[in-house]
């Protein structure tokens, strides 16, 4: 059986970020597989040109092989949990992911981080990007977290969230990575050894040739990473055209929109209209919310105000050793057969700060993640078949507790958030997961997600 290269290998620094970028690729017809963590064995490629999957089979998946993932995909996304880990650990895990993707024969590497550039002065965006550059033997890459469809735009190197500068948005209160500076050149320079430059909007608006000329000039100046402006999808497509030959791209999910068309032009892939098809799944539905972002607070409030069943998790009760998870599981089991339920630890910024001051930010977060993961595991075992999870750290804890090793990427619920189908679990009925970044989605996201049909 012949092997086949994957076109794009993506290293994502959290679980919701991985599904975010994967949804952009699927939307453009790239058959995409997401794996959870770095697989222990080398990839087995099962595509034989011009092989097409049999009728009824998912077009991007041949099923897990006994010794590791078997890929029939144009893109593979490796979901890590490195956004807030120590920089050295993030670098080590990212390089391990790179080696696995190289063994799959990837043509281009993509380091995916959040569209709000979540990081600290110590990293992890700069250290990981520079380590990947060194491993790929390249002296230049771009950094472009823009995602205009979700209101994340970059102009003159400054990141906007809607009409606000990043530093004026709710991200200034993020419990782990508060973003208090909207100047991305300055933010990235603080965590990078090499020089950071800028590709401005007026250059990008002139087209791909102008961008490539600017890149050549930046390289001549010794610039190794350049923030790239992007105020709309057209700018992202221009960047995709201009940067298709760079060994490494670093970005949020938006840049992925501009790449598949270029790959198709070069004959590296053939767009597949059925790339987002998942199995039809019925059964009880559960929503878990661990994020304390403004968007998730609004989503929880809308759910509660509508009179839907909801139970709040108290971190202080967890710290006292009370059986909070067991109580939540019993409460949910009594209601799940009637309608979806929500279990949440989401709170307003002031309450979050008070809890963190009392328990410590890391301890409070770990208690909540562990609790919600246990609730997810027990309720899936009890029959839940559709699971919506709000928050990157929470999503990571949940998929690990469920033993999920890979995900099929399905249709988008909203920009950046797709339905996915879990793989790598013990045999049983299918499980659908919607893993949502805390900041994504409108107020009615939970009900909109659960109302969607996923089978194409």
Image (spheres, grey):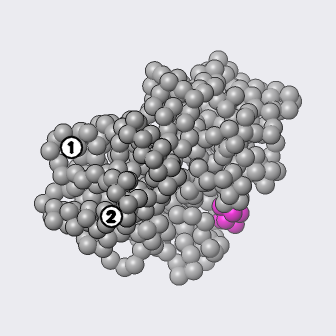
As drawn, which residue projects farthest toward the top?
202
User: Which comes before the other along the chain, label 2 or label 1?
Assistant: 1
> Is residue 333 placed above or below 20 in the rendered structure?
below
User: Residue 368 has which mark?
Assistant: none
Q: Is residue 219 left or right of residue 241?
A: right
Give SS at disc 2: loop
Q: Which residue is drawn at 31% across and 66% down?
A: 323
- Residue 26, position as x, y percentages in the image: 46, 50
> Is residue 425 placed above or below 272 in the rendered structure?
below
- Residue 350, position as x, y percentages in the image: 40, 35
Q: Give the range drawn in magenta.
A: 96-104
Q: Name the residue under label 1.
A: 304
Is mark 2 in CB contact (under 8 Å) with mark 1?
no
Dominant secondary structure of the residues highlighted in magenta in the image: helix
- Residue 58, position as x, y percentages in the image: 41, 65
Q: Is residue 349 left or right of residue 266?
A: left
63 or 196: nearer the eye?
196
Q: Can residue 191 be seen in this view?
A: yes
> Is residue 108 placed above or below 381 in the rendered structure?
above
Q: Mark 2 points at which residue?
A: 322
Local crowd size for mark 2, using a 10 Å CA cut-off: few (<14), some (14–19), many (≥20)? few
Q: Can residue 211 be seen in this view?
A: no
56 or 13: nearer the eye?
13
189 or 315: nearer the eye?
315
Give SS at disc 1: helix
Q: Which residue is drawn at 47% across and 57% down?
A: 366
Q: In this view, does 58 lie to the left or right of 266?
A: left
- Residue 363, position as x, y percentages in the image: 49, 55
Q: In this view, does 63 lie to the left or right of 184?
A: left
Q: Which residue is drawn at 35% across and 45% down?
A: 346
């Amino acid at each position: 059986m012949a092997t086949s290269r994957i076109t794009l290998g993506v290293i994502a620094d959290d679980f919701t970020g991985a599904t975010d970028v994967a949804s952009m690729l699927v939307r453009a017809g790239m058959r995409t597989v997401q794996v959870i963590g770095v697989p222990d064995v080398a990839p087995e490629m099962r595509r034989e040109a011009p092989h097409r999957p049999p009728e009824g089979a998912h077009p991007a998946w041949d099923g897990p092989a006994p010794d590791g993932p078997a890929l029939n995909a144009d893109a593979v996304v490796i979901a890590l949990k490195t956004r807030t880990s120590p920089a050295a650990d993030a670098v080590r895990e990212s390089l391990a992911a790179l080696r696995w993707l190289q063994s799959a024969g990837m043509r281009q590497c993509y380091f995916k981080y959040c569209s709000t550039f979540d990081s600290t002065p110590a990293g992890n965006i700069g250290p990981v990007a520079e380590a990947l550059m060194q491993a790929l033997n390249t002296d230049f890459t771009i950094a472009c977290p823009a995602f205009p469809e979700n209101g994340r735009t970059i102009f003159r190197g400054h990141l906007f969230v809607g009409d606000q500068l990043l530093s004026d948005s709710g991200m200034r209160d993020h419990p782990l990575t508060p973003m208090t500076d909207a100047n991305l050149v300055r933010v990235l320079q603080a965590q990078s050894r090499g020089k950071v430059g800028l590709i401005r909007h007026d250059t990008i608006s002139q087209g791909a040739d102008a961008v490539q000329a600017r890149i050549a000039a930046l390289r001549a100046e010794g610039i190794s990473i350049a923030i790239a402006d992007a105020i709309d999808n057209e700018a992202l497509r221009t960047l995709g055209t201009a940067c298709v030959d760079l060994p490494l791209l670093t970005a949020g999910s938006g840049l992925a929109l501009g790449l598949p068309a270029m790959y198709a032009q070069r004959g590296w892939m053939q767009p597949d209209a059925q790339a987002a098809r998942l199995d039809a799944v019925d059964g009880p539905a559960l929503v878990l919310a661990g994020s304390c972002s403004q968007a998730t607070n609004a989503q929880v409030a809308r759910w509660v105000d509508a009179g839907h069943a909801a139970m709040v998790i108290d971190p202080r009760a967890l710290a006292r050793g009370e059986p909070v998870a067991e109580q939540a599981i019993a409460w949910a089991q009594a209601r799940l057969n009637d309608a979806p339920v929500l279990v949440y630890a989401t709170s307003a910024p002031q309450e979050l700060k008070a809890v963190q001051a009392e328990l410590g930010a890391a301890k409070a977060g770990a208690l909540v993640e562990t609790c919600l993961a246990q609730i997810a595991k027990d309720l899936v075992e009890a029959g839940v078949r559709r699971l919506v999870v709000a928050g990157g750290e929470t999503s990571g804890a949940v998929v690990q507790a469920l033993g999920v090793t890979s995900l099929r990427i399905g249709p988008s619920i909203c920009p950046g958030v797709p339905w996915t189908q879990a793989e790598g679990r013990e045999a049983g009925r299918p499980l659908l997961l919607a893993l949502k970044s805390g900041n994504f989605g409108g107020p009615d996201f939970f009900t909109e997600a659960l109302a969607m049909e996923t089978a194409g």
